[in-house]
């Protein structure tokens, strides 16, 4: 069976000369949840933006067997949903329902079908009651749920979440973990939250200076790269 | 924030709220044309149109005092021009300017307070307003609150670091700090705009919004349209003939 995501030799340099990705190789199989770990600026988010065709570098990126290129980009964006770190930027429509229906409408569904699809996605994340609300009335956790609903509404095969626990309090993080565990899609989680990564991910890839230097379990990565924080006791 | 209050008002269930946005837009446009082009018996006409707007606000179950106060937001601007007219020896012209601008603002406020923004934008789109302009209005409405919140956070951060020095030197320092904060706010807004654009593209944005709301004209809308268009015209004709 071919992988859901296959990346080979991906390189990308920003306009200011920063080499963000320097030969990334990666694969994601169906049903997997993989954590992308590494320092700020190591290339994780730049890598994720390539999966959705928002950036285009050298090398090959395939999603569900489709090469990510201008010809396939609409279909690719239906298959892979990107949840951004700051939900405030992702929820740009005047109401929750309109925001969640934004993707289905762009993929050619009629307004009636798009509204039905949006309501089903909102029910899936437990936010159906907020359909008529404006996004600025929601809490950070609710905004994250609605942002995920906006992605689920196009029925993707893969979810990519960039720092999903940012801005969430512990109950919000717990609720998010429960929600994500219940979703059948393969997932890529970019995170610094090792507890969350341990709870959610079967595998981890560690980024350093624009390459994946090692893959393994979350625990192995945490030990090998001392990628965990336990506050020292001061009393 | 004004727009949060208006957003709450716009989600009412009165007869006026239920009308198709297109007929409300047409009625307000007619109201504005009648008011802007009137030049005789303005005191009587102003009183009559003001009464019509108050009745409409009551019908929409809006808090009348709140609505009247919010429409006054235009007065500081028009008062400047009215003052110039008064100083130039034409106080009547100044009074007319204040009256017309206030009534216009009240009419627009009624439209916005009885129509949820998505429906209002859809109504404008279907009546031929430029899509780009509507998109800008939509983003402004969505992110005004976010930007205002960021500005408040920056102000608190400045206050927390002792930005309360008074006197002339203090004012100069405050002005410099405010200018710097404005630049930071602009840079952050620019960065956010890029993030939003990316989020839109990630969900296959084709360059224009596909509408979720479908509008349909009903019998009640047609009756409202006739009433809304005829009433200001009839009032003006009757008042000018009676004079």
Image: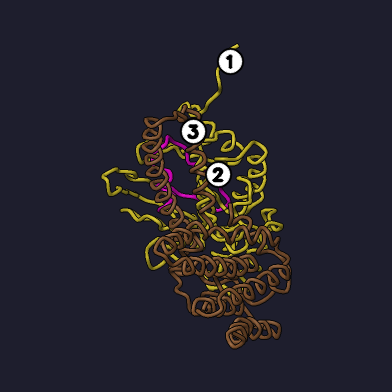
Which residue position holds label 3?
B157
In the rendered image of the structure, the colour used to display chain B is brown
Colouring style: by chain
Instruction: Determine which residue is flagged by label 1.
Output: A233
In the displayed image of the protein, which residue is found farthest to the top? Answer: A235
Q: Secondary structure at mark 2?
A: loop
Using residue A198 as the reference point, say whether residue B204 is left or right of it. left
Give B163 or B140, whichever is nearer the viewer: B163
Residue B30 % position (x, y): 55, 80
Residue pictured at 49% horizontal, 33% vertical: B157
Q: Which chain is yellow?
A: A
Give above or below for A225 relative to B90. Answer: above
Mark whose residue sits in front, 3 or 2: 3
Are the residues at dot 3 and dot 2 in contact (C-beta closer than 8 Å)?
A: no
Residue A38 inside the magenta-drawn segment: yes
Q: Which residue range is magenta in the image?
A: A26-50
Q: Chain of mark 1?
A: A
Q: Marks 2 and 1: in contact by CB < 8 Å?
A: no
Name of the residue lying farthest toward the bottom: B241
Marks 1 and 3, how far apart at CA: 31 Å
Residue drawn 33% across the image and 45% down it: A23
Q: Residue under circle 2?
A: A164
Total count of labels: 3
Query: Quarter-wise, where is residue A96 in the image?
Result: bottom right
Instruction: Name, please, the residue furthest toward the left.
Output: A17
Question: Which of the labelled discs sits on residue A47, or is there none?
Answer: none
**Residue B24 occupies quadrant:** bottom right
Residue A80, how many percent across, how many down?
Answer: 50, 57
Q: Are marks 3 and 2 on the same chain?
A: no
Residue B205 lies, in percent from the top left, at 46, 65
């Amino acid at each position: 069976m071919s992988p859901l995501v296959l990346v080979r030799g991906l390189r990308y340099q920003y306009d200011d000369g920063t080499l963000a990705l320097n030969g990334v190789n990666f694969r994601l199989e169906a049903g997997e949840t993989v954590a992308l770990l590494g320092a700020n600026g190591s290339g994780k988010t730049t890598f994720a933006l390539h999966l959705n065709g928002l950036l285009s570098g050298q090398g090959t990126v395939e999603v569900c067997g489709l090469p990510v290129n201008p010809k396939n980009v609409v279909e690719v964006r239906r298959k892979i949903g990107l949840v951004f770190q700051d939900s405030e930027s992702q929820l740009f429509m005047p109401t929750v329902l309109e925001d969640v229906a934004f993707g289905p409408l762009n993929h050619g569904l009629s307004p009636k079908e798009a509204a039905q699809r949006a309501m089903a996605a909102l029910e899936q994340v437990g936010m159906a009651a907020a359909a008529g609300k404006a996004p600025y009335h929601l809490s950070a956790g609710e905004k994250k749920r609605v942002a995920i609903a906006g992605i689920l509404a196009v029925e993707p095969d893969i979810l990519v979440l960039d720092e999903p626990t940012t801005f969430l309090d512990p109950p919000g993080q717990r609720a998010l973990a429960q929600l994500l565990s219940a979703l059948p899609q393969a997932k890529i989680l970019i995170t610094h939250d090792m507890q969350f990564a341990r709870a959610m991910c079967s595998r981890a890839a560690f980024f350093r200076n624009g390459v994946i230097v090692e893959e393994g379990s979350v625990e192995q990565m945490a030990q090998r790269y001392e990628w965990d924080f336990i506050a020292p006791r001061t009393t | 924030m004004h727009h949060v209050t208006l957003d709450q008002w716009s989600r009412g269930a009165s007869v006026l709220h239920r009308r198709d946005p297109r007929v409300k837009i047409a009625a307000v446009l007619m109201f504005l044309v009648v008011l802007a082009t009137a030049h005789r018996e303005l005191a009587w006409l102003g009183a009559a149109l003001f009464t019509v707007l108050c009745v409409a606000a009551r019908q929409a179950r809006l808090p009348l005092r709140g609505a009247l106060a919010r429409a006054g937001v235009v007065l500081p601007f028009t008062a400047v021009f009215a003052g110039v007219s008064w100083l130039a020896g034409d106080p009547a012209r100044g009074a007319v300017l204040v009256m017309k601008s206030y009534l216009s603002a009240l009419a627009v406020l009624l439209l916005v307070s009885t129509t949820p923004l998505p429906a209002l934008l859809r109504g404008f789109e279907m009546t031929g307003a430029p899509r780009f302009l509507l998109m800008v209005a939509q983003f402004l409405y969505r992110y005004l609150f976010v930007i205002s919140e960021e500005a408040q956070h920056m102000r608190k951060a400045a206050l927390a670091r002792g930005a309360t020095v008074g006197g002339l030197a203090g004012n100069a320092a405050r002005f410099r700090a405010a200018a710097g904060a404005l630049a930071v706010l602009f840079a952050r807004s620019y960065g956010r705009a890029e993030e939003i654009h990316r989020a839109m593209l990630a969900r296959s944005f084709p360059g224009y919004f596909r509408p979720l709301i479908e509008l349909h004209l009903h019998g009640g809308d047609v009756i409202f349209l006739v009433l809304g268009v005829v009433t200001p015209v009839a009032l003006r004709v009757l008042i000018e003939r009676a004079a």
